[in-house]
């Protein structure tokens, strides 16, 4: 349950940091270039729901108030990543040319940090260094708050329940990782908590969703949101699924296939990581229709570059048992779908933090495939929950 901590004195539109874990990946680079373009008024905020009624009335940090920092395990310059994304058709060349001079400044705010992998005996020092990096970024830039968003490569699932609500286990893990160790995304989440930052998990990796960390973050009076951005096939499923249910049409099976190029596709082709993604992608159909046949596949097709293709085949039954089917295909640029959500989440989570909210932000479920603290998956219901919640936040007119 979301709880109210003591209200923070600052208004939501003060200078805000967006700390990206995986800051040199496709989603992060698209977010950086997109934010720079928005700050210069070069593009419309297409895909950013916070710029449209009724969310545009909420006191949220303006684009000009958002500062980006982050960390990654590689040091590839943002410019190199952005050039590749422009060649792939994700970023317009003209927009990239206009913001190119600013990329080096953001490179300077991105730390190269080794992967705090399980089994390595430096997890405690890795967490401490990362927390110090985030706190230093906040202090140097004079930021009111920093929202940490995980957009790093997907990790394999871990046995979350093994991580009890016992802080002693965490201390033991950090001190003696030979026995038990945090997944890298959870080490990042712990660093965010120690730095006093709200946290968003845009990936299906474990992140903050270990019982011991969920307890810590709530006790620290910090809000968090996740998991796994809902940008394509699952978005479509969560909008269409409730239609079948409302019309009393019986869904017999819902089958899906995904073809992915890009870095995410390559990661998901590796052993283990696909299991995390398939698990979060399956949540919506299971929640909406129970135990229907719902096979789901992800294939890596490097030739597609940053394009993703999703096919859905929905077999359903109508009046008098008539058998029918709906077939859909969705083609999109993964990172172009994700980046506006990352920006929206940064603004909304900053507003939640400014309002003194702590614990899971269940009202942000429409942004995620596996919404934390909620089993509501129908998009219209999730959208209503978001706008109802947003109506409780301070209005822009009042706080500016
Ligand atoms: N539409 C979308 O693009 C979408 C939707 C939902 C979720 N996601 C998730 O977002 C994440 C990023 O996707 P992407 O396409 O940018 O992938 P990508 O492979 O292009 O980028 C991932 C980045 O994370 C870095 N990284 C790996 N391990 C790290 C660690 N321990 N700490 C910090 N950085 C680390 C990599 O070096 C890389 O730069 C993936 O987990 C993906 O599943 C993407």
Image (cartoon, rainbow, N blue to C red):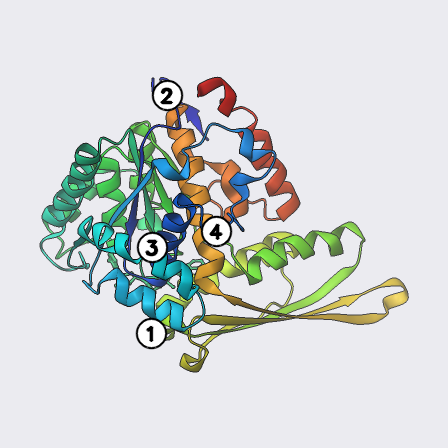
Closer mark to the observer between disc 3 and disc 2 = 3
Q: Position of residue 39 (x, y in %)?
A: 39, 44
Q: Position of residue 267 (x, y in %)?
A: 34, 70
Sequence-wise, which precedes: disc 3 or disc 2?
Answer: 2
Q: Which mark is residue 43?
A: 4
Which residue matches tag 2?
Answer: 5
Query: Which one is in front, 400 or 262?
Result: 400
Q: Residues within 10 Å of mark 3 (few under 14, many from 20)?
A: some
Q: Which mark is residue 270?
A: 1
Q: Secondary structure at mark 4?
A: loop
Please give left or right for residue 119 compared with residue 360 in the image: left
Q: Secondary structure at mark 3?
A: helix
Sequence-wise, which precedes: disc 3 or disc 4?
Answer: 4
Which residue matches tag 3?
Answer: 99
Q: Residue at x 88, y 62 (%)?
A: 319
Q: Residue at x 59, y 42 (%)?
A: 382
Query: Which quarter shows the C terminus?
Result: top left
The Cα–Cα distance between marks 2 and 1, rounded to whole angstroms, is 42 Å
Q: Residues within 10 Å of mark 1 (few under 14, many from 20)?
A: few
Please give left or right for residue 112 compared with residue 206 in the image: left
Q: Quadrant of residue 67?
A: top left
Query: Which one is in front, 313 or 150?
Result: 150
The Cα–Cα distance between marks 3 and 4, rounded to whole angstroms, is 12 Å
Sequence-wise, which precedes: disc 2 or disc 1?
Answer: 2
Please give left or right for residue 149 compared with residue 299 in the image: left
Please give left or right for residue 266 compared with residue 255 in the image: left
The Cα–Cα distance between marks 4 and 1, rounded to whole angstroms, is 36 Å
| Residue 246 versus residue 13 in the image, above or below | below
Q: Quadrant of ligand 1?
A: bottom left
The Cα–Cα distance between marks 3 and 2, rounded to whole angstroms, is 39 Å
Closer mark to the observer between disc 2 and disc 4 = 4
């Amino acid at each position: 349950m979301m709880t109210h901590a003591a209200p923070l004195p600052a208004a939501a539109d003060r200078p805000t940091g967006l700390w990206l874990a995986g800051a040199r990946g496709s989603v992060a680079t698209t977010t950086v270039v997109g934010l720079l373009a928005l700050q210069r008024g070069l593009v419309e905020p297409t895909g950013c729901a916070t710029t449209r009624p009724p969310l545009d009335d909420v006191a949220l940090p303006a684009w000009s108030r958002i500062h980006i920092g982050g960390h990654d395990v590689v040091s590839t310059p943002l410019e190199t990543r952005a050039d590749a994304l422009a060649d792939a058709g994700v970023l317009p060349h003209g927009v990239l040319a206009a913001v190119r001079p600013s990329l080096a400044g953001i490179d300077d705010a991105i730390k190269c940090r080794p992967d705090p992998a399980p089994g390595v005996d430096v997890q405690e020092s890795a967490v401490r260094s990362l927390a110090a990096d985030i706190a230093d970024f906040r202090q140097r830039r004079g930021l009111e708050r920093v929202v940490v968003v995980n957009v790093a490569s997907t990790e394999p699932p871990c046995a979350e329940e093994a991580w009890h609500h016992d802080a002693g286990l965490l201390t033991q893990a950090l001190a003696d990782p030979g026995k038990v160790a945090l997944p890298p995304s959870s080490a990042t989440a712990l660093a965010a908590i120690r730095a006093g930052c709200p946290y968003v998990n845009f990936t299906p990796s474990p992140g903050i969703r270990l019982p011991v960390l969920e307890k810590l973050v709530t006790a620290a009076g910090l809000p968090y949101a996740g998991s796994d951005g809902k940008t394509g096939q699952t978005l479509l499923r969560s909008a269409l699924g409730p239609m079948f249910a409302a019309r009393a049409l019986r869904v017999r099976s819902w089958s899906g296939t995904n073809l992915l190029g890009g870095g995410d596709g390559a990661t998901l082709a590796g052993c283990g990581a696909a299991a995390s993604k398939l698990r979060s992608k399956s949540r919506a159909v299971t929640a909406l229709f129970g135990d229907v046949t719902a096979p789901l596949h992800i294939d890596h097709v490097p030739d597609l570059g940053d394009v993703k293709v999703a096919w859905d085949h929905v077999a359903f039954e109508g009046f008098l048992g008539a058998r029918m089917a709906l077939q859909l295909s969705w083609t999109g640029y993964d990172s172009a779908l994700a980046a506006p959500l990352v920006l929206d989440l940064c603004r909304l989570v900053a507003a939640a933090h400014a309002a003194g909210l702590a614990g899971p932000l269940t009202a942000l479920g429409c942004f995620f495939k596996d919404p934390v603290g909620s089993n509501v998956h129908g998009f219209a219901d999730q959208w209503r929950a978001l706008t109802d919640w947003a109506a409780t936040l301070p209005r822009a007119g009042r706080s500016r």
